[in-house]
Amino acid sequence: MDRNPPPFDPGNGVHPHGSDEWAQILTRTIGHLAAQLTMAQIRLRALASELHDGGTVEAGAVATRVRALAAVETGGYLRENLGEALIEVIDVDALEHDLVAYLSDPENS
């Protein structure tokens, strides 16, 4: 049995999952992503606060590292976090490009 669903063809408007199944997959995926994001934000906020309060890191060095990591790792993280169901319907390459551009902008450091 093939574990991969047939690819979604936006041109025909028919998704390989039934509408109820698709809604459940989408809801579960969004909930999972929101939970991952929330945990990551809390952990990063705690780490950054500790490092800042201890004078351990230089803000410019962190911004440089963010830009370097964004250029190399954004696409992989996006695909991993979106999951198969959403990769079929989201332009991941465009989203990756936008995220890398945002993270590379010094005003967003």
Image (tube, helix red, strand yellow):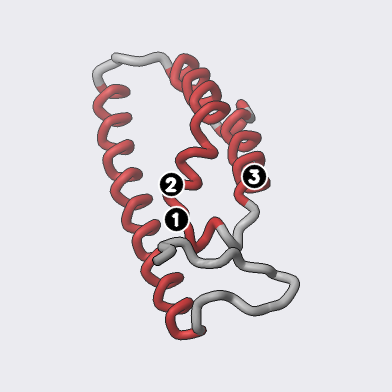
Badges 1 and 3: C-beta atoms under 8 Å apart? no
Residue 90 lies, in percent from the top left, at 60, 58
Q: Label 2 is placed on what type of residue? A: Glu
Q: Label 3 is placed on what type of residue? A: Asp
**Label located before the other in sequence (2 or 3):** 2
Quarter-wise, where is residue 1 in the image? bottom left
Callout 3 crowding tier (Cα within 10 Å): few <14, some 14–19, many ≥20: some
Quarter-wise, where is residue 106 in the image? top right
Q: Is residue 59 above or below residue 3?
A: above
The answer for how far apart the CA atoms under marks 1 and 3 are is 14 Å
- Give residue 93's mark: 3
* Secondary structure category for the residue under label 3: helix
Q: Is residue 32 left or right of residue 66?
A: left
- The residue that mark 1 highlights is 83
Q: Label 1 is placed on what type of residue? A: Gly
- The residue that mark 2 highlights is 80
